[in-house]
Image: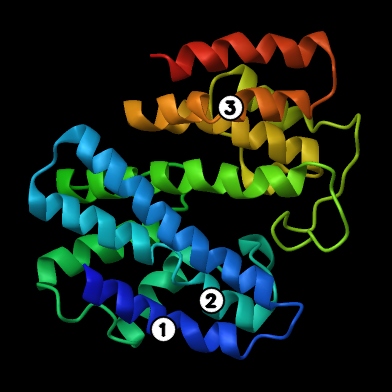
Amino acid sequence: MTHLKEIFSRFVSPYLQNATDRERPDIQLKIDHSFDVFENSRNICESLSLPAERTETAQIAALYHDTGRFPQYKAYGTFKDSESCNHGTLGARTVLKYALLNELPRKQRNTILGAIALHNRNALPSFLSDELRICTEIVRDSDKIDIIKVLIPHLTGVLPGNEVPLMGLKEKPEEITPAILQSVKEGRQGAYQAMKCLNDFRLLLLSWAYDLNFEWSRKEMIKRGYVETLMSQLPDTDQIHALRNPIIEQLNS
């Protein structure tokens, strides 16, 4: 695993070195995120007592899951897929293009490529193999838990310069898009495409409670105080307060 971490670091290094002063924090954010998602995947695998090979596959996929973010940002200057490209698909293509995982057995490499390509889907297809499904679910949970950690500081006292991590969304204190609110009410994950302001983003992050696959992830969302922090940043209305208990019940399930 150490060797594959070194390969990843060598791959991302030129993106950081060639970035402007304005771009460098955004690139570093994704590098740090990749390693933190790897750590989350390690914790999930330990909680599941997975066999060594399946654990290794999931952890490699977690480390490389956002490989596409670096060429995406270089080409488009954004992490917003709707204004650029699908970073999951680009990530799998990039791993192949630069032969980053060619030392791995073909079957294991294909599972990792599948998880990279699928990790950002709103929902997973039903026809996946057990191997690919659990690998992708581990990556998705690991990713979500760290994304919330990364975004909460940016969502707290929003300042100029946060446009890239917050995908260009603006603070509109009393606004909420009905489609996003309805998703949370119905106990399902919100859609990125429907977001129109930062309150929508906060609700979308809360809606991830309904798309976490493993007990470790659900407990971690409570343990880190994500629900309370995000709820405190939303409008102080009965409609919003009514969302809290179902989310907590879901996370305790």
Q: Work out how far the residue at label 1 is from the one at label 2, CA to CA, in angstroms.
A: 9 Å
State left or right for residue 4 relative to residue 89: left
Mark whose residue sits in front, 1 or 3: 3
Residue 253 to residue 228: above or below = above
Q: Residue at x 61, y 41 (%)?
A: 191
Numbered badge on residue 131: none
Mark 2 or 3 closer to N-term?
Answer: 2
Question: Which quarter of the figure is the C terminus placed in?
Answer: top left
Instruction: Inspect the image, locate mark 1, and give the three-letter code of the amino acid beneath it.
Output: Phe
The answer to whether the residues at label 1 and label 2 have Cβ atoms under 8 Å apart is yes
Circle 2 residue: 70
Numbered badge on residue 11: 1
Q: Work out how far the residue at label 2 is from the one at label 3, CA to CA, in angstroms.
A: 30 Å
Q: Position of residue 244 (x, y in %)?
A: 64, 14
Mark whose residue sits in front, 1 or 2: 1
State left or right for residue 16 relative to residue 232: left
